[in-house]
Amino acid sequence: MKVDLNGKIALVTGSAQGIGKAIALALAANGAAIVVNDLDAALGAETVKAVRALGSRASFIPADVSKREDVDRMVAAAESEFGAIDILVNNAGVNTPGPLRRDINEYDAAEWRRVMSVDLDGLFYCCRAASPGMVARKQGSIINIASVMGVVPIRRQSAFAAAKAAVINFSRSIALELAPHGIRANALVPGSILTQGTSALFYNPEQQKLAESLLSHIPLARPGTCEEIAHAALFLASPEASYITGTTLTVDGGWTAGFARDW
Ligand SMILES: NC(=O)c1ccc[n+]([C@@H]2O[C@H](COP(=O)([O-])OP(=O)(O)OC[C@H]3O[C@@H](n4cnc5c(N)ncnc54)[C@H](O)[C@@H]3O)[C@@H](O)[C@H]2O)c1
């Protein structure tokens, strides 16, 4: 897909790897300058290199999105170096790792706070910090990365399920507030996506049974790619999506359409 993002500046949180990196590269390949954010400076530098190889400007600005001071500093630095933030992609996210995945009667309170602080507080801080500049310039596009877990929860990940459901409704809420200022806000809902993280968890030969069981829930019977999520983000960021705000774009191979298996 080709769109025209020449002259636009995009801040993509958590873009050192995975879905965020693919989104950064898709936006850059269509002309946007990219502010790469992550906790991982070494991998972030690789994203910057890859963006520059596509002919776009890029800088790495480290920040922990769960810390308001970090986020405010990041946004101020991005606006000072690039002049504006036109596209904000809130992608940085964490989920509860295997050993801490528990039913609510045993769920760890610190783990709940950790997930909420990155997946929900972080998103609020980034929108809070970047929106005044967008309001002043009367333009902008905000894309919040949610998850199918925020639409159809599964067990033992209540923090992630709650945070991602909140991301969807938060996106609708700010879409209402920002529309009069010419700013669009949408949620993007990935299904199960092939990344280093999911490869380590289940998409590997040792976990074939687990992967098959998961894929039996997905009508298209395969994980999605980071690029398939990036194409959707690129569309939402593009001028072609100028009448789309407050929506939830689901890219999940049919996961949330219903039951893929017979009873
Ligand atoms: N991979 C999937 O199957 C899948 C499915 C649904 C939703 N998602 C969502 O997509 C987004 C990206 O997922 P991914 O699979 O590419 O993850 P990933 O773990 O591969 O990459 C996430 C990046 O975010 C960074 N990050 C984590 N906490 C941060 C913080 N506090 N501040 C700044 N950066 C931080 C990490 O360092 C990492 O580089 C997440 O919001 C995730 O919940 C992923």
Image (spheres, helix red, strand yellow):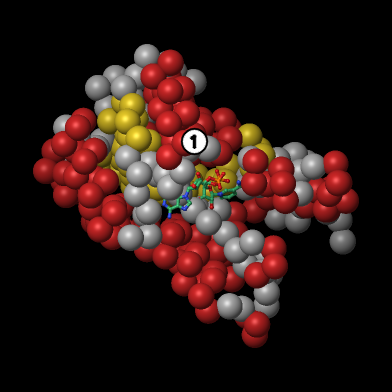
Q: Report how many numbered discs are placed on residues in the image.
A: 1
Question: Which residue is rendered at x = 46% and y = 22% of the image?
Answer: 50
Depth order, front residue of 6/64: 64
Which one is in front, 22 or 196?
196
Spot occupied by residue 66 in the image (x, y as percentages of width and height):
38, 60
Measured as percent of width and height from the top left, residue 46 is found at 47, 28
Label 1 packing within 10 angstroms: few (<14), some (14-19), many (20+): some
Q: Quadrant of the C terminus?
A: bottom right
158 left or right of 183?
right
The residue wearing badge 1 is: 43
Q: Is residue 9 visible?
A: yes
Disc 1 secondary structure class: helix
**Viewer-nearest residue: 73 or 107:** 73
From what the image shows, is residue 79 above or below residue 178? above
Q: Is residue 260 left or right of residue 104?
A: right
- Looking at the image, which residue is at 25% across and 22% down? 7
Farthest residue to the left: give it.
Answer: 136
Cβ of disc 1 within 8 Å of ligand 1? Answer: yes
Left or right relative to 138: residue 231: right
* Residue 24 image offset from top left, x and y in percent: 43, 31
Which residue occupies the extreme bottom position in the image?
105
Q: For the point 32% across and 40% down, which residue is it?
A: 61
Residue 213 at x, y percent in the picture: 83, 53
Tell me the residue at 51%/32% (across/down).
Answer: 22
Q: Is residue 24 visible?
A: no
Q: Quick one: 191 or 207, which is closer to the camera? A: 207
Question: Residue 194 lies in what quarter of the image?
Answer: top right
The three-letter code of the residue at mark 1 reads Leu
Q: In the displayed image of the protein, which residue is found farthest to the front?
A: 42
